[in-house]
Image (spheres, rainbow, N blue to C red):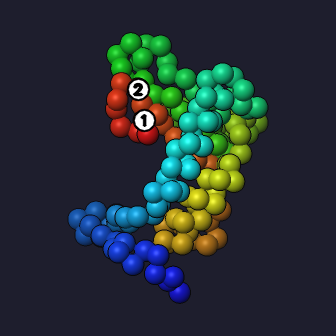
Amino acid sequence: DDDGSNEDATETFFPSVPGLRYIPNVLDAETHDVLVQFIHSQLALGRSGKLEKKATYTPIPPKWDKRLQGREMLQYGTYTHSNRVYTDHEVEVEPMPEILRELVVERLVERGVFGEEKNEEDARKNLSSGGGGGGG
């Protein structure tokens, strides 16, 4: 079944945390670069107010930005705020982009992270300011 493209990718399981596993090399360098470029283009569209569904992009709240604790967010499929998931009728965001489905979701299905029947329809990307994690 395996085409050998991930033969050096060995999963690591952590018995102390049931269900936790590390799966290396889900994305190759070229795919990573394509995704980073896509995220940067979406971020630019969001910052300039050019995304069709405005709630897809969330800017850094000013009070957080002053403390360098802020993050920008891109949300696709569903909108969340303060750990609450909003329905499409409450807040509309862009649907899951096909590039994310093809380059991320399908790879996660192939690696067994999601089952075949799982059809992921939403994704989030947090981009931290001040050189913090997640800004890539």
Is residue 89 placed above or below 117 in the rendered structure?
Answer: above
Dot label at residue 56:
none
User: Foreground: 79 or 34?
Assistant: 34
First along the sequence among labels 1 and 2 = 2
Is residue 112 placed above or below 52 in the rendered structure?
Answer: below
Distance (Cα) linking label 1 and label 2: 7 Å
> Which amino acid is tagged 1?
Gly
Classify residue 128 as left or right of residue 81. left
Quadrant including the C terminus: top left
Query: Residue 107 is drawn in which quadrant?
Result: bottom right
Most extreme residue toward the front is: 30
Callout 1: SS: loop
Dot label at residue 129:
2
Tell me whether the residue at label 1 lies in contact with that at label 2, contact meaning CB atoms closer than 8 angstroms: yes
Asked whether residue 62 is in view, the answer is yes
Is residue 102 placed above or below 13 in the rendered structure?
Answer: above
Question: Residue 124: image x %, image y %?
Answer: 55, 43
Rendered residue at 64%/60% (across/down): 102
Asked whether residue 85 is in view, the answer is no
Rendered residue at 47%/76% (across/down): 5
> Which amino acid is tagged 2?
Ser
Callout 2: SS: loop
Question: Residue 95: image x %, image y %?
Answer: 71, 45
Residue, disc 1: 135
Classify residue 21 as left or right of residue 85. left
